[in-house]
């Protein structure tokens, strides 16, 4: 068909219907516009009738209210009268505005207003007469009020009937116009469509043939799109199959399984290049049994596998020889028809080859798919190998750390042995004064022992040098980890603060909406409740994340001191009783003696107990019971147990309670928590030196317990105001007090065992700097051992406080630190420490430092001890 004929067909079969459609649309637009205009007037008439009915009702309310008052004398009957009187004129004037285009109706309403004003004057007179006790019945009997009421009703009836007639006329006009217009349009459309179909049939048949040709081309295009979709879908599925961090073997097995499923290959193998030699070794197989006839190793460039890796291109083989490979199953065996060798690349380097065997000839789209995924599989294998090498390095690092610890133990044992030998030498020197005859023999033995000691010291120096390098490397790694942890914690703290500000605004405005709406709809109330519930949940999560960040970064300040458990439990009870009462949960608290004290941070202990109590209430059965029990343990600790009568937990759930983001209510159907509350609770308990655990029985309930160290009532042992005379040891020597400020119980126990070797020394321990400062002022120890990294006030700040106090300024203070470099030691000595000892603590070094400090503390007060020592 030529262009001119096609244009003619378009003009007749497209242009003419389009023109008819435009004319029809214009016609219908005019018709619809007319109908809408009439409908608006009909709706206007309905509104006028509604307003007229309201005026009619007000007329009845006026008359009824007045009659009720006249008959009963009760002022309450005037309520409808007063309401109708205030609404009558405004409503009538509004009605006049609505019928402003109809003068007769306006005149009727104006007459109605005039009659109403006269009736109102009459009603006021009668009501006043009734109130004053006058003869109001005579006024009613004259009939003036009835005549006015009848006139008002006639005007309203006439007004309403006129509006109803006007509405009927408009409805009739709409019906007639719609019928004629639609009929004419249908007749014209049918005639025009018949003529158009008659003349256009022949050309449309030609167009049908052209359309068939176009559909054939569309089918080819659809096949191309399906091919592309198949390629893209395969790459997406392969990427999903390789997600995660699998090992090299698992990644190779996944790749072959996917290729076998997606391409329907019967046999597959994956060869991985060795990093050192470049040889290819089979690491995974699919569809064949391990056989001696199947080669597993190819040297560089050997065979088709090696050539495919060297050529870096897909190799496809058809018409395979009969002895190439057999595919066997329980039903029979066969020979593959074609084989594909796919080199796997990562960053322009071949790191493996995949061999695939098919029972058919490969399609072009399958070859294109294999070329497309080669780099994806290669990069995934390279990443897996990198992760494997990284794990090996980490394992070697861990092994090196264990060896370092072993060597440190050996060094510690060697040091003790050297100290023992040194004591033997001192004893030998004492015997030399009385045993001159054995002098030569003893000297020879001493010379041999000295040579042995010198050799051992040289060997120890070499080990110490090696350990120093290793320790420096470990300290650098630990510093990097601490820096990353600090950045994470600072980020969490800052984000928590930034989130809390808008969240508080959201909660505040939501509460204003809830309290400011007098009668909210159920949907509004439900929405506001959901906003508040989600907001409080998010605020709780932010607070717990902030606590967790402070704990992990070591910035959480704790003040561990004797705390009255009775006072803490009383405050906790006051905070949870209202929520327990809402759910009908009974509460039972123990009777604690007045001297029941534990060593803890008061605020954090209360936070721990409130969290356990809220959980016990939240996950309890309706009308259940929560009880708190306190029992003293044999190890000098007090166990506080919170028991509930809930559904209970499985042993697996109990083992996962204190893991991050574990939610108790997930299976029980209860309201879920944040998932980190118990983690924060556990870490707070551990920071305070306590322990926490849980037991549960399904169908019976759960019990969470916290164990804290018992303490004496505060103020009883700290009432000394003057220096007391030092006690005496068993052998009559003067007993000296050594104060050790240390928050690690293990280090405190170690020093206590070291001090116990000397009968004239006793150890006084303090868990933080504040308590250590107070003990120093009260007990006046001879020597103070100060840990540098203390919670709250650091060891350096505590030393400065003691130096400023005249009572404690003269006491020698020895610093103990596990993370000290020469620069830190120099600064510490310049700041005012008597000595600076690094951990792990060496027995001889510590005792020598204590002896030197005891000698200095015996000097008269007021002397500059640091200057004298220098």
Image: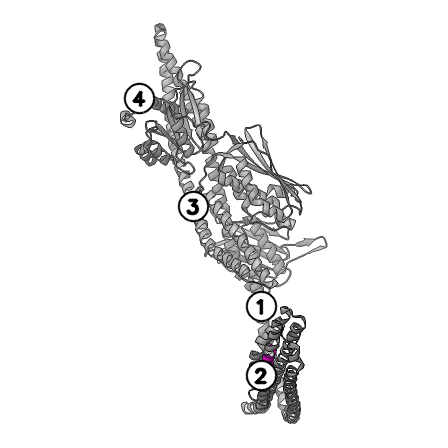
The residue labelled by disc 4 is 859
Q: Nearer the viewer, mark 1 or mark 3?
A: 3
Say which of 816 and 819 sits in front.
816
Q: Earlier in the sequence, mark 3 or mark 4?
A: 3
Compared across the picture, whether 732 is left or right of 235 comes to: left
- Tell me the element at label 3: helix
Residue designated by label 3 = 486
Above or below — where is 472 with respect to 169?
A: above
Q: Nearer the viewer, residue 657 or 498?
A: 498
Can you tell which of label 4 and label 2 is closer to the viewer? 2
Please say if 770 is above or below 90.
above
What is the chief secondary structure element of the magenta stretch? helix
Please rate how many residues cluster around mark 3, counting C-alpha atoms within 10 Å: few if below 14, some from 14 to 19, many from 20.
some
The answer for how far apart the CA atoms under marks 1 and 4 are is 96 Å
Task: Measure the alpha-carbon separation of dots 1 and 3.
Answer: 52 Å
Q: Secondary structure at mark 4?
A: loop
The quadrant where residue 225 appears: bottom right
Image marks 3 and 2: residues in contact by CB distance under 8 Å:
no
Secondary structure under tag 1 reads: helix
Q: Are marks 1 and 3 in contact (CB under 8 Å)?
A: no
Q: Considering only order in the chain, which callout, 2 or 4, is on the residue closer to the N terminus?
A: 2
Label 3 vs label 2: CA separation?
84 Å
Dividing the image into 4 quarters, which one contains the C terminus? top left
- Real-space Cα separation, disc 3 to disc 4, in angstroms: 45 Å
Q: Which residues are magenta?
A: 115-123
Question: Is residue 158 located in the magenta-colored stretch of the structure?
Answer: no
């Amino acid at each position: 068909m030529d262009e001119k004929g096609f244009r003619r067909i378009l003009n007749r079969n497209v242009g003419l219907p389009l023109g008819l459609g435009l004319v029809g649309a214009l016609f219908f637009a005019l018709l619809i516009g007319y109908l809408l205009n009439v409908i608006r007037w009909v709706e206007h008439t309905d509104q006028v009738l509604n307003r007229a009915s309201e005026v009619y009702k007000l007329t009845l309310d006026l008359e009824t209210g007045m009659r009720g008052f006249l008959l009963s004398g009760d002022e309450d009957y005037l309520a409808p009268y007063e309401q109708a009187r205030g609404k009558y004129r405004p409503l009538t004037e509004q009605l006049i505005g609505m019928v402003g285009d109809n003068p007769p109706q306006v005149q009727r309403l104006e007459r109605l207003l005039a009659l109403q004003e006269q009736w109102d004057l009459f009603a006021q007179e009668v009501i006043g007469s009734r109130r004053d006790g006058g003869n109001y019945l005579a006024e009613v009997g004259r009939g003036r009020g009835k005549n006015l009421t009848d006139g008002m009703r006639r005007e309203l009836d006439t007004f309403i009937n006129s509006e109803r007639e006007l509405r009927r006329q408009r409805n009739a006009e709409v019906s007639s116009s719609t019928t004629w217009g639609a009929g004419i349009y249908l007749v014209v459309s049918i005639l025009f469509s018949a003529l158009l179909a008659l003349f256009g049939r022949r050309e449309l048949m030609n167009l049908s043939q052209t359309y068939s040709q176009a559909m054939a081309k569309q089918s080819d295009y659809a096949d191309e799109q399906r091919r592309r979709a198949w390629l893209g879908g395969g790459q997406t599925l392969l990427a999903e199959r390789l997600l995660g961090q699998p090992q090299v073997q698992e990644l190779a097995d996944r790749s072959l399984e996917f290729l076998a499923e997606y391409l329907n290959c019967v046999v597959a193998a994956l060869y991985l290049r060795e990093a050192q030699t470049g040889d290819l070794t089979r690491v995974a197989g699919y569809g064949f049994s391990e056989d001696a006839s199947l080669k597993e190793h190819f040297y560089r460039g050997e065979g088709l596998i090696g050539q495919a890796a060297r050529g870096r291109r897909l190799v496809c083989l058809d018409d395979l020889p009969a002895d190439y490979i057999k595919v066997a199953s329980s039903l029979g065996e066969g020979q593959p028809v074609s084989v594909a060798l796919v080199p796997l690349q990562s960053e322009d380097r071949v790191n493996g080859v995949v061999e695939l065997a098919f029972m058919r000839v490969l399609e072009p789209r399958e070859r294109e798919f294999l070329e497309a995924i080669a780099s994806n599989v290669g990069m995934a294998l390279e990443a897996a190998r990198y992760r494997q090498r990284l794990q090996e390095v980490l394992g070697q690092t861990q092994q090196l750390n264990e060896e370092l610890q072993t060597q440190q133990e050996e060094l510690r044992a060697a040091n003790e042995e050297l100290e023992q030998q040194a004591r033997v030498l001192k004893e030998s020197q004492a015997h030399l004064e009385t045993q001159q005859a054995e002098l030569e023999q003893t000297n020879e033995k001493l010379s041999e022992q000295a040579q042995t000691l010198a050799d051992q010291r040289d060997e120890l120096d070499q080990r110490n040098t090696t350990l120093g390098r290793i320790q420096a490397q470990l300290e650098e790694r630990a510093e990097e980890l601490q820096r990353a942890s600090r950045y994470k914690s600072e980020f969490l703290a800052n984000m928590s603060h930034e989130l809390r500000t808008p969240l508080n605004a959201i909660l505040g405005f939501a509460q204003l909406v809830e309290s400011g709406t007098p009668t909210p709809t159920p949907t509004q109330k439900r929405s506001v409740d959901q906003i508040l519930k989600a907001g409080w949940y998010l605020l709780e999560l932010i607070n717990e994340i902030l606590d967790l960040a402070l704990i992990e970064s070591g910035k959480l300040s704790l003040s561990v001191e004797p705390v009255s458990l009775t006072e803490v439990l009383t405050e906790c009870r006051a905070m949870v009783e209202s929520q327990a009462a809402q759910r009908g949960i009974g509460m039972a608290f123990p009777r604690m003696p007045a001297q029941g004290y534990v060593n803890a941070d008061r605020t954090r202990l209360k936070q721990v107990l409130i969290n356990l109590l809220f959980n016990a209430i939240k996950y309890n059965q309706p009308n259940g019971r929560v009880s708190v029990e306190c029992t003293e343990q044999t190890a000098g600790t007090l166990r506080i147990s919170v028991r509930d009568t809930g559904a209970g937990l499985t042993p697996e759930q109990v083992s996962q309670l204190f893991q991050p983001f574990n939610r108790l209510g997930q299976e029980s159907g209860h309201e879920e928590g944040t998932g980190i509350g118990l983690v924060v609770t556990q870490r707070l308990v551990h920071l305070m030196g306590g322990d926490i655990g849980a037991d549960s029985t399904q169908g019976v309930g759960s019990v969470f317990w916290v164990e804290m160290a018992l303490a004496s009532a505060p103020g009883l042992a700290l009432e000394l105001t003057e220096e007391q005379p030092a006690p005496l040891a068993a052998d009559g020597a003067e007993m000296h007090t050594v104060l050790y400020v240390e928050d690690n119980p293990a280090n405190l126990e170690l020093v206590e065992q070291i001090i116990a070797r000397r009968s004239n020394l006793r150890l006084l321990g303090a868990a933080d700097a504040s308590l250590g400062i107070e003990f120093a002022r009260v007990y006046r120890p001879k020597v103070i051992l100060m840990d540098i990294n203390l919670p709250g006030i650091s060891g350096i700040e505590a030393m400065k406080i003691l130096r400023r106090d005249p009572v404690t300024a003269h006491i020698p203070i020895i610093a103990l630190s596990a993370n000290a470099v020469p620069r830190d030691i120099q600064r510490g000595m310049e700041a005012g420490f008597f000595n600076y000892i690094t951990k792990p603590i060496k027995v001889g070094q510590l005792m020598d430092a204590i002896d030197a400090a005891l000698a200095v503390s015996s000097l008269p007060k007021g002397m500059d001890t640091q200057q004298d020592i220098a």
